[in-house]
């Protein structure tokens, strides 16, 4: 918008017939139009979340480097430093995923296989807590047009949240079914549930119920689902557990019909 007004200013300057105050005011409005209160708050929350996730590993790295400088040299220090650097990189990548439009590769994929891969990846974490993940397939041959990698990332993140919210010897149930145009995936845990007042903030940046968490996970998940022309809804209540419902189209308008089902 600023360039538009600059062009206008240049044209009017040629004829020596413009109002300096009016044009300058228009330029100021154009340059600050996007700085609404909501956007400022959003940027602030994103910055706070990234700062929180980066600060802890940087503090750890600084401490171990100081020990090394003091001549206290242990082999495990280096592996810890590398691990903390990986955490910093992961935090930066999360912000990039939010800020950039990711390339989406739509192909025909088995929804059962995507869910099975996500469950397999999360099973070790679940077993360490004594939690069972039960995948109930209603149609093993069900396929949809989607980005397999991104959807698996969404499922893994939601299953991980369910595991962390559940006590030992609890179950997590995953089901899916289709109608004429969509597939509905449900992931339900038997955790403590989420209070109503916190439900309103689940998809906000930097909001999270857990320690050492920025709250970017659900934001990124919703972004991916929206890129698939789908929807994600969360139902929960204290003592009721949490249910995540995901609705995805079997076909996608972004993909040529010849490449779909």
Image (cartoon, rainbow, N blue to C red):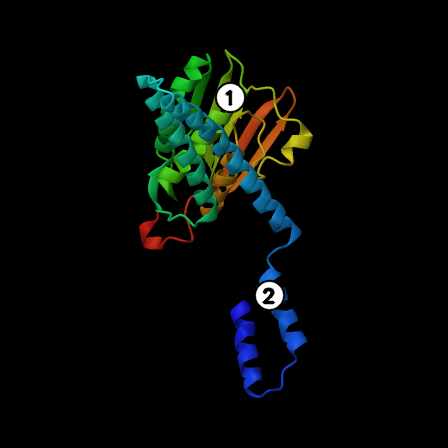
Residue 236 position within the rendered picture, expressed as x and y whole percent measured from the top left: 62, 28
Q: Which of 107 and 84 is in front in this view?
A: 84
- Secondary structure of residue under mark 2: helix
Q: In this view, does 256 lie to the left or right of 182?
A: left
* Residue pointed to by mark 1: 164
Seen as rendered, the residue at the extreme bottom is 15
Residue 95 position within the rendered picture, expressed as x and y whole percent measured from the top left: 47, 42
Q: Which of 37 and 167 is in front in this view?
A: 37
Identified at 37% across, 49% down, the residue is 103
Q: In this view, does 177 lie to the left or right of 40?
A: left
Q: Quadrant of the N terminus?
A: bottom right
How many numbered circles are shown?
2
Instruction: Note whether residue 171 is visible.
Output: yes
Identified at 35% across, 20% down, the residue is 77
Return the disc, 1 or 2, that comes first in the chain's sequence.
2
Residue 225 position within the rendered picture, expressed as x and y whole percent measured from the top left: 47, 42
Residue 151 position within the rendered picture, expressed as x and y whole percent measured from the top left: 41, 38
Q: Nearer the viewer, residue 6 or 253?
A: 6
Q: In which quarter of the image is residue 68?
A: top left
Identified at 66% across, 80% down, the residue is 19
* Residue pointed to by mark 2: 30
Marks 1 and 2, how far apart at CA: 46 Å
Q: Nearer the viewer, mark 1 or mark 2?
A: 2
């Amino acid at each position: 918008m600023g360039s538009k007004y600059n062009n206008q200013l240049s044209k009017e300057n040629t004829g020596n017939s413009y109002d300096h105050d009016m044009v300058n005011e228009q330029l100021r409005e154009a340059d600050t139009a996007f700085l609404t209160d909501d956007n400022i708050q959003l940027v602030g929350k994103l910055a706070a979340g990234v700062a929180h996730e980066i600060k802890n590993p940087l503090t750890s790295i600084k401490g171990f480097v100081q020990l090394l400088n003091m001549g206290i040299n242990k082999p495990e220090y280096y592996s810890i430093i590398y691990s903390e650097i990986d955490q910093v990189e992961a935090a930066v990548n999360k912000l990039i995923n939010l800020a950039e439009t990711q390339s989406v590769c739509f192909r025909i994929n088995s929804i059962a296989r995507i869910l099975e891969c996500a469950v397999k990846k999360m099973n070790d974490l679940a077993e360490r807590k004594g939690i069972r993940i039960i995948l109930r397939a209603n149609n093993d041959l069900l396929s949809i047009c989607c980005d397999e990698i991104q959807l698996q990332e969404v499922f893994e993140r939601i299953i991980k949240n369910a595991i962390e919210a559940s006590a030992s010897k609890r179950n997590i149930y995953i089901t899916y079914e289709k109608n004429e145009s969509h597939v509905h995936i449900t992931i339900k845990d038997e955790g403590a549930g989420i209070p109503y007042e916190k439900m309103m903030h689940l998809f906000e940046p930097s909001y999270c119920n857990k320690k050492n968490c920025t709250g970017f996970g659900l934001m990124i998940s919703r972004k991916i689902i929206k890129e698939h022309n789908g929807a994600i809804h969360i139902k929960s209540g204290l003592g009721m557990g949490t249910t995540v419902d995901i609705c995805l189209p079997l076909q996608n308008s972004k993909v040529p019909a010849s490449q779909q089902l």
